[in-house]
Image (tube, rainbow, N blue to C red):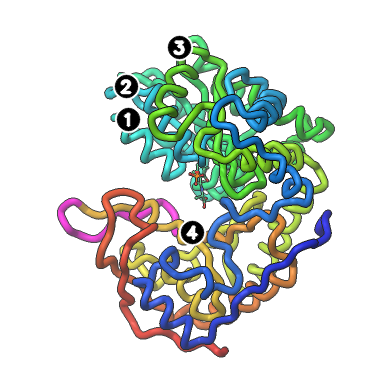
Amino acid sequence: MEPFRIKSVEPIPFPTAAQRRNSLAQAGFNLFRVPARQVTVDLLTDSGTAAMSAAQWSAVFSGDESYAGARSYEGFEAVVRELTGMPEVIPVHQGRAAERILFGALLRPGEISVANTHFDTTAASVTAAGAPCVDLPCCVDSTDEFGGNIDLEGLERVLRGPERVRCVVLTVTDNAGGGQPVSPANLAEVRRLCAPRGITVLLDASRFAENAYLVTRRDPEWARTSIPDVVRAMFDLADGCFASLKKDGLANTGGLIALRDTALARDCRDRLIEVEGFPTYGGLAGRDLEALTQGLREVVDPRYLEYRAESASWFAGQLEAAGFPVLRPTGCHAVYVDAAALLPHIPAAELPATALANALYLAGAVRVTDLGTLVFGGPDPEGGPDRPAPREWVRFALPRRVYTRNHLEYVAGIAAQVAAKATALSGYRILEQARTLRHFTAVLAPLGEPVPFEH
Ligand code: F0G
């Protein structure tokens, strides 16, 4: 059960079928453009959507809002140093700010960045620094216990090749690859390959605590190690990290760069001053730093992490019972459903993941994310059909400490209604799209008539 009780509540909206149809059409059939007041259960993201604890809310009140050298920075620096062992601690307002600053300082044109998978915003910052991204996930349809691992043979091949590898990034957990963990053994091997070549090993540590918990459950060697010790063992193998603290920071905003290299940290701070503010607040209010400091202490609680992993696994079972093909084993932050398997009649170019996500909205105002061709595919430069993504997943992200089993049972009920009408669903085409990260703003059009749902 939830290892907390609820102290503050917020009513949720219940739009009618007509309102849902209208909202989706007005949003150009893109769930990112649907107003939250038209959503009943919002599983769009686990980012910035956490419920804060009473201890966090009281810490908020003691925020020091001094421009320079605020006391709130000192607490934040101390907890990050304790967790990571890294001396240079730089707050930023969210993960992509960390990425833009760090990769801007680290990469030069002609160099490349290799990763298990660069998350989409990470890839955007690496590319903006003039460096191509190479993704080497260990397995595409992961049923592996450590499906987030990087393909070590592939990495060795790239290291022996002509390209100049500047950094290797391990995203823990691998959000683009089903939320699967990276093992300490895989990271140790990456370090062994990179250290003699002077290649920087970085963690995208946005879900570092969830990764550590899954390590203790999936690798008997680590079963008796405390979460903070696993966390520390992982950071000890890296030269630096960046993170969106909107996830395992258990707060609504925030991000981080932590490094060992003082010269690189100085360059990051200089860049930070141009775009984020002063290096002791990095685009955050003192009260945000206080919420994060407390959140980072709470997130390594094994009872909380157990509840989180167990709810994801239980929810996956509910979706399976509803007829959805689910990725197993589940991680912590989301359940991933294979839209291509459920909707084999919709080709990748007609966006099956979008079709499934939109049907869930129309059926019951449930909002999930498309992680298929709209997100990871791309337009054909010659104007032909879209380049397909490797997988057509829909992600049911689980905001931290927000929804109970009753809410998720409601979602499973809606999923059953959608599964019953799966063969009648049709795809979408793109009318308008941005140059990068197109899924946030794209305008779409349905390729068939909408399927009616019950209520
Ligand atoms: N890295 C990972 C692994 C992420 O999942 C995200 C964000 C970021 C970096 C960027 O962080 O949003 O704070 O700028 N993921 C969100 C999601 C958006 O829904 O998965 P940000």
Stretch of the chain drawn in magenta: 381-393
Q: Tell which of 374 and 349 is nearer to you.
A: 374
Residue projecting furthest to the top: 196
Q: Earlier in the sequence, mark 1 or mark 3?
A: 1
- Left or right: residue 53 versus residue 247 is right
Q: CA distance from mark 1 to mark 4?
A: 29 Å
Disc sitting over residue 10 in the figure: none
Return the x and y of residue 225 as percentages of the image width and height. Answer: 81, 30
Which class describes the residues within 10 Å of circle 1: few (<14), some (14-19), or many (20+)? many
Return the x and y of residue 406 as percentages of the image width and height. Answer: 74, 72
Quarter of the image with the N terminus is bottom right
Give the residue number, with chain letter if any, for mark 2: 108
Q: Earlier in the sequence, mark 1 or mark 2?
A: 2
Q: Amino acid at mark 1?
A: Ala
Q: Amino acid at mark 2?
A: Arg
Give the residue number, with chain letter if any, for mark 3: 197
Ligand 1: does it lie within 8 Å of the C-beta at label 4? no
Assign a secondary structure to mark 2: loop
Return the x and y of residue 135 as percentages of the image width and height. Answer: 42, 37
Assign a secondary structure to mark 1: loop
Disc sitting over residue 129 in the figure: 1
Q: Is-magenta flag for residue 390?
A: yes
Q: Earlier in the sequence, mark 4 or mark 3?
A: 3
Assign a secondary structure to mark 3: helix
Q: Are the residues at dot 1 and dot 2 in contact (C-beta closer than 8 Å)?
A: yes
Q: Amino acid at mark 3?
A: Arg
Give the residue number, with chain letter if any, for mark 4: 393
